[in-house]
Image (cartoon, grey):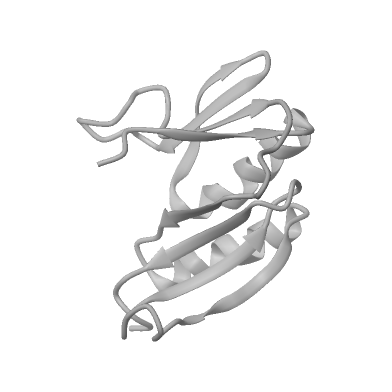
């Protein structure tokens, strides 16, 4: 349904490094970089995907209130790897990896606050396996 989306970040270099590290375990990386923006997407992009990225960060003033973005994970292992990588890259824990049955019985996710305070999630809809 959504082709691409993006957020503004206060420190482009710091945020780019954060997202490179946090999204790598999910198979996402930089597909296009401009002086003040970067587009991230699956590596390699799927046949119907925007070849420049589905998620963009752009230098600017972060939105208020901060928004929530959930990235798809193929497995609980990817969710855990995302959480660990994001913490190592300077993110703050906002929900350890685990089941979230309030959403549905197999909703396995982890939440991180990025350098600007955006609530970033990795989610797998297949349970703990």
Q: Is residue 99 above or below residue 110?
A: below
**Quick check: 75 left or right of 85?**
left
Q: Position of residue 96 (x, y in %)?
A: 61, 77
Task: Find residue 125 and report its image quarter.
Answer: bottom left
Task: Find residue 59 and report its image quarter.
Answer: top right
**Quick check: 122 left or right of 33?**
left
Q: Residue at x 76, y 48 (%)?
A: 115
Q: Residue at x 32, y 33 (%)?
A: 3
Q: Position of residue 10 (x, y in %)?
A: 77, 33
Q: Residue at x 37, y 78 (%)?
A: 103
Furthest-top residue in view? 35
Q: Quadrant of the C terminus?
A: bottom left
Q: Quadrant of the N terminus?
A: top left
Q: Is residue 94 above or below residue 1?
A: below
Q: Is residue 47 above or below residue 101?
A: above
Q: Residue at x 61, y 22 (%)?
A: 37
Q: Position of residue 12 (x, y in %)?
A: 73, 29
Q: Is residue 73 above or below residue 108?
A: above
Q: Position of residue 43 (x, y in %)?
A: 39, 37
**Quick check: 42 left or right of 112?**
left
């Amino acid at each position: 349904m959504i082709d691409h989306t993006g957020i503004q970040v206060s420190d482009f270099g710091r945020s780019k490094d954060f997202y490179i590290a946090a999204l790598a375990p999910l198979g996402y990386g930089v597909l296009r970089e401009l002086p003040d923006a970067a587009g991230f997407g699956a590596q390699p992009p799927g046949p119907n995907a925007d070849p420049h990225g589905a998620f963009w960060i752009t230098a600017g003033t972060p939105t208020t209130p901060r928004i929530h973005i959930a990235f798809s994970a193929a497995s609980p292992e990817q969710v855990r790897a995302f959480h660990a990588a994001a913490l190592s890259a300077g993110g703050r824990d906002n929900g350890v990896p685990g089941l979230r049955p309030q959403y549905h019985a197999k909703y396995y996710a982890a939440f991180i606050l990025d350098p600007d305070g955006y609530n970033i999630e990795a989610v797998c809809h297949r349970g703990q396996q």
